Amino acid sequence: MRGPTAPQKFIKKNTASAGCTSAGSYSKHSKIMSSSSTFKPLRGRRVVSLALNLPGPAALMRLGELGARCLKVEPPGPGQTPAGRPISGDPMGQYNIGAYNTLHEGVRVAQIDLKTERGHAQLARELAKADLLLTSFRPSALHKLGLNWKAVHRAHPALSMVEIVGAPGDRADEPGHDLTYLAEAGLVPGTDLPPSLLADMAGALLTVEAALGVLMQAATSGKGAHRQVALSDAAAWLALPRHWGLTLPSGAVGGAHAGYRVYPCKDGRVAIAALEPHFAASLFAAAGLPPPDARAPFAPPAREAIAAWALTKTRRQLDALAVARDIPLCTLSNK
């Protein structure tokens, strides 16, 4: 067993913002919630996480930003770095150290071998002080480790627990990953990979939601509560707009509306989201088109006219038009 290790050095990355604007502009940040925020509803709460890879650490990061004191327990890693520091036992720390550092900023990390009695004893001491346990093992693995909900609740009656699994119920032991859950939900229509790990990140937010729920219930009842979060359910939640037809090619936000599309422009691309009638009217006026009625934006000639107009404009010109005419758009490079 190895003792607690300090989080690895946080690496900041500069991110150049695209020319996105809706009567203004924004810049991208690595963290969504400011660490300097005074909104800390979980101040004084202790969270222990055994969850590796992305969903669990992403949820832990959010809980930490809400004020919780967070401990991440990892298995011993495969040796040490050239500088003599332990290599992370979390696969994320081995194949993307930048992501790992961001996820674990402000998190205390301990390498504990849960397959040993000594490791179990150390974890038990941490759980005795904690309010919440996060896991992402398959249920069968938790049972082998003696960390299934029944065993945890018997040993620590006041401790709450949130389990992250791939699929709910009887399918919880099935292997899977973000890609398979998105594919199952109908969110992988072609052969290209999705641009982000959507099920993992949505699952992290559902985990935070579940964590807040069990902590509230425990505060009322005095007993720990338990929830299971399935990444396949997170993917299914994200897929609802598509199943409702909203993002299908025939849908208003699937490309049928001329004001809600991505068009080539003179030196890149422009994502236009002029969906509401007043935004559509501003877009049509900027493009030199007559004021649209409710059906005009759905007509092929409208899409063709705006496409031709966008090709005559540079990103800088489109950004200026967005501010001057109150049009929601984001200009992009072709990279």
Image (spheres, rainbow, N blue to C red):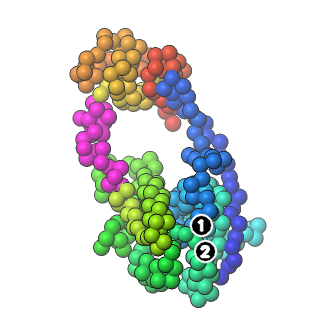
The structure residue drawn at horizontal position 40% and vertical position 51%, both measured from the top left corner, is 193
In this view of the protein, which residue sits in the foreground, 43 or 53?
43
Q: Which residue is mark 1?
A: 46
The kind of residue on which mark 2 rests is: Lys
The kind of residue on which mark 1 rests is: Arg
| Residue 41 x, y percent position in the rendering | 57, 54
Residue 92, by quadrant, is: bottom right
In this view of the protein, which residue sits in the foreground, 283 or 151?
151
Classify 10 Å Cα crowding around label 2: few (below 14), some (14-19), many (20 and above).
Answer: some
Classify 10 Å Cα crowding around label 1: few (below 14), some (14-19), many (20 and above).
Answer: many
Q: Is residue 55 left or right of residue 45?
A: left
Give the residue furthest to the bottom. 117
Q: Is residue 295 left or right of residue 190?
A: left
| Residue 184 x, y percent position in the rendering | 30, 58
What residue span does the magenta drawing correspond to? 235-256
The structure residue drawn at horizontal position 54% and vertical position 21%, both measured from the top left corner, is 316
The structure residue drawn at horizontal position 61% and vertical position 58%, both measured from the top left corner, is 43
- Of the numbered discs 2 and 1, the one sitting upstream in the chain is 1
Helix, strand or loop at label 2? It is loop
Residue 188, numbered circle: none
Q: Which residue is mark 2?
A: 129
The number of discs equals 2
Helix, strand or loop at label 1? It is strand
Does residue 169 belong to the magenta stretch? Answer: no
